[in-house]
Image: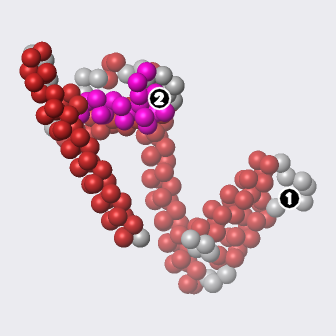
Amino acid sequence: MQDNVDALKQAERVMMDAIHAAISRAAVESEAAFQSHGTRTTAQNYFADVAMRRLFLHLCGANADTAKGGDPEYAWDILYAGRGTARYWEKEHGIRSRRRKAESHAELERETREKSALTQSAQKLATDTAIHALIEHASKADPTLRDRISSAVEARVSVTDQLSQVEQDFADLARVSIARLVGTIT
């Protein structure tokens, strides 16, 4: 596994070295044109920006020459991730973000949902860990505890009538969840 990770990291380094080399080569070849136009940016920065924009269009499935045909949802996902990185850097430098007012209502709702999901996920992990530890401890004194807990859940989810797909999914998820909590599966 570690060998695969190391191979991927090496491939990433090779790729980034090639991108940097291509940007440097393009900058050297066109430096005179940049100087003669008196642009405010360097050729190096210009080509890095071009590479970033074209890769963005590529990732979004758009035509890199016309910018048409891209997936807007994927584009927003990338931009949302970038915004999160910018906020992290602002916080790292002690800068209070000035960008909040320009955010759309949908972006604020999405951020709220993601924070809520993260909080729920962390709470679930803590609760599951505590319950699993308590069951583990109590099972030493009562070896039948796991079976009794599993049987109680099975009695609740087992119905002799035909289950709807939602009820069947609920039953399956309940069985897997209780098996994880009591430690019969990992």
Secondary structure that dominates the magenta span: helix
Dot 1: within a 10 Å radius of its alpha carbon, few (fewer than 14), some, or many (20 or more) residues? Answer: few
Q: Is residue 166 left or right of residue 42?
A: right
- Residue lying farthest top? 37
Would residue 56 be counted in the magenta stretch?
A: yes
What is the x, y in percent for residue 53? Answer: 33, 30
Q: What span is colored magenta in the figure?
A: 48-66
Q: Could you say which disc has been placed on residue 62 in the image?
A: 2
**60 vs 115, nearest the viewer:** 60
For the point 56% across and 71% down, the residue is: 186
**Which of the 4 image quarters holds residue 155?**
bottom right
List the residue tagged with mark 1.
159
Dot 2: within a 10 Å radius of its alpha carbon, few (fewer than 14), some, or many (20 or more) residues? Answer: some
Q: CA distance from mark 1 to mark 2?
A: 51 Å
Above or below, comparing residue 99 to residue 3 in the picture: above
- Can residue 72 be seen? no
**Which of the 4 image quarters holds residue 76?**
top left
